């Protein structure tokens, strides 16, 4: 295969090789884990038909996910990008259910269609909250894409909707607390914002961002959002600017 084109000046080229067959790897992993538990498996691992399980198949085990507030806590506190993408794809693989809250949609092998449904679910929610989706680009939901786009105004509107939501306590509890835990554990210690700001951070090469809530001097929650996109934000310079903004809000009075 030959690729033509140009690399951006700040782009690094790398090559990744997948030398293991996916199904063989899964089979070996399953057998190894089963042996650790004292069991043994005979036969071979076969891939299920895309149309569904064979008539003589039977359920051996099932796993129920943790509640969404617990999952979001791991996503936001520690910026777990893989888990963030999983939650994003869940939006495209579940449907509302009055009794259960949600239930799986019929099986679909296409990740692209799942992502499309997730995108539509997010845009539908934004519309229900009267938040403009103009210019919004969602690629993979992981937080690591350079193609995704959102404006500070859109993010601020989402945070304002969070304060109005009946799930507001769970949402706030998932955000890192300045000078205390998560990605904000070492930031803004011994400052007016310590334990008074709940901030989700975001970082890529040449990009640093914050979005969350800061309590001002009158103990009123303020929505704070800032994106810095510039090569000069490297080395902590951008973070210092954003920390200064958070401190200023925490000291301010209406």
Image: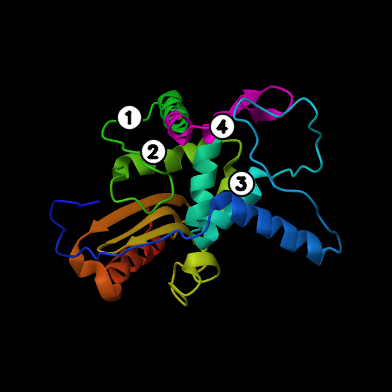
The disc placed on residue 157 is 2
**Label 4 vs label 2: CA separation?**
26 Å
Q: Is residue 190 left or right of residue 52?
A: left
- Image location (x, y in percent) of residue 229: 23, 57
Q: Would you identify the image quadrant in which residue 154 lies?
A: top left
Q: Is residue 201 left or right of residue 109?
A: left
Render colour scheme: rainbow
Task: Please identify, in this view, whether the residue under mark 1 or under mark 3 is nearer the observer.
Answer: 1
Category of crowding for the residue at label 4, using alpha-carbon neighbours closer than 10 angstroms: few (below 14), some (14–19), many (at least 20) = many
- Image location (x, y in percent) of residue 137: 31, 38
Residue nearer the viewer, 133 or 96: 96
The residue labelled by disc 3 is 169
Q: Which residues are magenta?
A: 91-116
**Label 1 vs label 3: CA separation?**
25 Å
* Vertical arrangement, residue 108 with respect to residue 18, above or below: above
First of labels 1, 3 by sequence position: 1
Residue 209 within the segment the image draws in magenta: no
The disc placed on residue 93 is 4
Contact between labelled residues 1 and 2, with CB atoms less than 8 Å apart: yes
The residue labelled by disc 1 is 132
Q: Secondary structure at mark 4?
A: loop
First of labels 4, 1 by sequence position: 4
Q: Secondary structure at mark 1?
A: loop
- Image location (x, y in percent) of residue 116: 42, 30
Residue 106 within the segment the image draws in magenta: yes
Q: Secondary structure at mark 2?
A: helix
Marker count (numbered): 4
Contact between labelled residues 4 and 3, with CB atoms less than 8 Å apart: no
Identify the residue shown where x is 44% and y is 60%.
217
**Label 2 vs label 1: CA separation?**
9 Å
């Amino acid at each position: 295969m030959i690729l033509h084109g140009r690399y951006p000046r700040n782009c690094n080229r790398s090559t990744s090789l997948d030398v293991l067959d996916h199904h063989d790897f899964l089979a070996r992993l399953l057998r190894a884990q089963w042996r650790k538990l004292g069991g043994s498996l005979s036969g071979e691992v076969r891939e299920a038909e895309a149309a569904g399980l064979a008539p003589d198949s039977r359920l051996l085990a099932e796993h129920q996910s943790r509640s969404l507030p617990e999952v979001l806590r791991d996503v936001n506190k520690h910026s777990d990008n893989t888990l963030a993408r999983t939650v994003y794809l869940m939006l495209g693989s579940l449907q509302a259910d009055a009794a259960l809250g949600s239930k799986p949609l019929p099986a679909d092998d296409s990740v692209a269609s799942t992502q499309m449904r997730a995108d539509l679910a997010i845009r539908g929610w934004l519309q229900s909250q009267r938040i403009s989706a103009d210019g919004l680009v969602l690629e993979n939901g992981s937080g690591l894409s350079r193609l995704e786009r959102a404006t500070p105004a859109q993010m601020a509107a989402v945070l304002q909707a969070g304060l109005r939501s009946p799930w507001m306590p769970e949402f706030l509890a998932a955000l890192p607390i300045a000078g205390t835990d998560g990605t904000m554990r070492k930031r803004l210690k011994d400052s007016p914002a310590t334990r008074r700001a709940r901030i989700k951070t975001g970082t890529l090469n040449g990009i640093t961002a914050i979005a969350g809530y800061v309590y001002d001097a009158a103990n009123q929650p303020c929505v704070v959002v800032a994106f810095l996109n510039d090569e000069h934000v490297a080395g902590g310079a951008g973070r210092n600017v954003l920390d200064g903004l958070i401190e200023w809000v925490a000291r301010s009075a209406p």
